[in-house]
Image: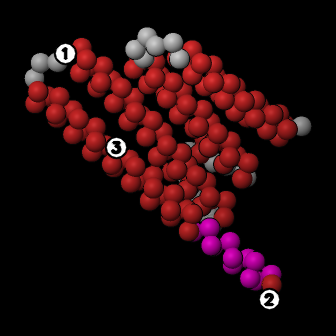
Amino acid sequence: MLRLLFSKSRYIVIVPIVGTLIAAFGLMLYETMAMVTALIDIVQKGALVQKEVKALAVGMIEAVDIFLIAIAMYIISVSLFTLFIDNTLPLPQWLVVPDLEAVKASLVSVVIAVLAVLFLRAAVAWDGGPDFLGFGIAMAMVIAALSLYLGLKGGRKKS
């Protein structure tokens, strides 16, 4: 009886699967609407000044950041589904995950990409203030630590 309970309890993972899938779709739709609205506003204004173009560029970089987070949510949703519910789902090879460690590695990879986008956004918006170097160093340290984590996890799997 306990064996049956454990074999069926894996379906409780449907809750985070559906939650992350809804979050992914919601973020994608919201950010798409925000981008379209911003572009329509720019077109309606007509002539662009450099300040508005820079603001638009920063806004688009922020949109990419949101899309990356949405994609991470989608990858987590699909990965959990294939790990716990149905491992025969036809997926591109890059989306196939063999275990939960691979899901975490995918998440860390997306976090690195999001941090890079955050740094790019800060670089574009930088006004020449002195605190940018400290921000860059802190960002580099976090990315280096996450990359080291990925390298060590990857190295451990190969052994």
Q: Residue at x 24, y 14 (%)?
A: 50
Q: Is residue 157 left or right of residue 91?
A: right
Residue 93 lies, in percent from the top left, at 61, 43
Most extreme residue toward the bottom is 1
| Res. 35 image quadrant | top left
Res 93 visible: no
Q: Nearer the viewer, residue 157 or 136?
A: 136
- Quadrant occupied by the N terminus: bottom right
Q: The C terminus lies in which quarter of the figure? A: top right
Q: Which mark is residue 49?
A: 1
Q: Secondary structure at mark 2?
A: loop
Secondary structure of the residue carrying tag 1 is loop
Q: Is residue 5 magenta?
A: yes
**Disc 2 designates what residue?**
1
**Residue type at numbered disc 2:** Met
Colour pattern of the rendering:
secondary structure
Task: Name the residue that disc number 3 marks.
Answer: 31
Instruction: Work out whether residue 78 or residue 39 is closer to the camera in this orientation and state it.
Output: 39
Q: Chief secondary structure of the magenta span?
A: helix
Which of pointers 1 and 3 indicates the residue nearer the eye?
A: 1
**Which residue sits at x=56%, y=68%?**
15
- Amino acid at the residue labelled 1: Val
